[in-house]
Image: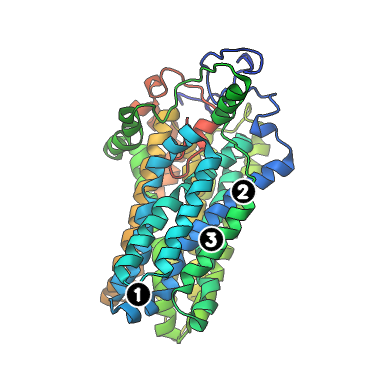
Amino acid sequence: MDPISPNQHHSSSDSTVPDARKDSVVPPSIGHMMSPDDPENPQNWQAARKVYVSMVATAFAFAVAFGITSLTVGIQGLMMQFQVSMTVAILGMSLFLYGVAFAPIIAPHLSERFGRSPVYLVSLPLFALFILGAGTSKSFAAVAVCRFFAGFFGGPCLVLIEGTFADVWSPHKTVTYYSVLSLASYVGAGCAPIILGYVVPAENWRWTQYVTLMIALAAFLLGIGMPETYPREILRTRARRGGYTINLAKAESGVTLAEMARTTIFTPSAMAVSDPVVIIITLYLALNFAVLFQWFITVPVVLAMTYGFTLHQAGLAFVAAVVGAIASTFTSSLVESVTNRRHGCTSMANMAPIEHRLVPGIVGSLGLVASLFWIGFSAKPTTHFLVPICGTGVYVWSSMSILTALVSYIFDAYPAKGTLSALTLMATTRIIFAAWLPLVIIQMIMGLQGQWAYSVFGFLAVPMIAVPIILFIFGPRLRARSRYSAPTMSNGKHPMSHHVDQEMQMGSVDH
């Protein structure tokens, strides 16, 4: 039997918790410790305010995701100006991703200490400064360094969006809001080649960074008035203004450096070799993201070599990827709505078993395998170019459906600390693999030919079809046997607010 029911793990805050406005000292309690009827609780805000906050978080994540893939449109320009190989030029994207890989480890601790809004409003300008530096660099080494730090400082925007959405939206719609927030990253990355495919031929590769800078500036202007959504920071601010002492429960991300390192470095490392659920999901998402980001390198190359596409024509091919991401949001949300109706789920106090969140991933796993063979064996002169392009759309739909399903599942698979550690591992690993594969993919295609290069990925994805099915059937038993399901992972308290669980696609739980 599952050691933690979904209702327990998502319980908001106990109604018996004293309101900080009535008591000078608030004792430790569970969850984010804001009363469900507290008007300052972000989940009680008016719809317009919730939508504004969500739009700001989405815009920030979109800007950074756009920056990840923007430089891929200027690879030829980089090669010519700095006399470097294609592999070296691709480092401009890979180093950015390596910088982002630090965000799941660092962002939870920053958010716990300063709240979400300050981190957003510092992270994005620093990201923009290094993007500007990359665009004005006089050597490739300078481009590479600036791109790494752009990813390092922009990464928290990709992490905090999960926490922001979890702060303001109800947990019984976890799959829906996670698919919506994932759309920001998928569409941001996909829009870069579409837009810049027109800009770069008319200007030069530097405009890949200048356009990114303009988008970041627009997002920043939109977010200047963003209110704080992190409940712990709201309570701390209210206590400071009221002149009283507040005693919050210990942050799940840790307080001392040793505790922080244990939660986001050492425990994830141990999980990577000891927890079956975490291991299989981590491997699946690593393959998923590695193949996802190599498309930004191979699609322009293959379309140019096979069909004679220009840069802007190849960029338009990514419209299929954007459509696939939007379709995934729709289908995943639809599945959750049907599931909730069948189980009579109307609030976080009455939620369906978390295994039902895996359904989009089960279907997506089949689509992933099919799309890889589809693309590999259709990208040839005798086949119309729309056939492999549509295949990439199916891949993106499958990829995002799998990501949404597996991460939404992990949100409530363990007590808070176990969840944070698991998602930190998964996020960091998949980003590292996403940075690595583009560096070798051209050599793979040239050595194996496109059909067999993508067949290799297809064959690797075949056994992964079993991952969401195994978790759907055996998940509760596997988690019950895990050492990370023990009460000690949550300091002896299993019930945690959904904030503890849903603040992290990339490991952004901040409690």
Distance from the alpha carbon under mark 1 to that under mark 3: 27 Å
Q: Dot 3 lies on which element?
A: helix
- Residue assigned mark 2: 224
Q: Nearer the viewer, residue 29 or 244?
A: 244
Q: Nearer the viewer, residue 202 or 366?
A: 202
Does residue 510 lie above or below 331 as drawn? above
Q: Dot 2 lies on which element?
A: loop
Q: Nearer the viewer, residue 417 or 475?
A: 417
Asked if labels 1 and 2 touch by Cβ distance under 8 angstroms, the answer is no
Q: How many marks?
A: 3
Mark closer to the observer (1, 3): 3
- Residue assigned mark 3: 188
Q: Nearer the viewer, residue 438 or 147?
A: 147
Label annotation for residue 489: none
- Residue assigned mark 1: 450
- Amino acid at circle 2: Ile
Q: Is residue 472 left or right of residue 448?
A: right
Q: Dot 1 lies on which element?
A: helix
Distance from the alpha carbon under mark 2 to that under mark 1: 47 Å
Mark closer to the observer (2, 1): 2
Q: Position of residue 288 (x, y in %)?
A: 40, 56
Q: Earlier in the sequence, mark 1 or mark 3?
A: 3
- Amino acid at circle 1: Gly
Q: Earlier in the sequence, mark 2 or mark 1?
A: 2
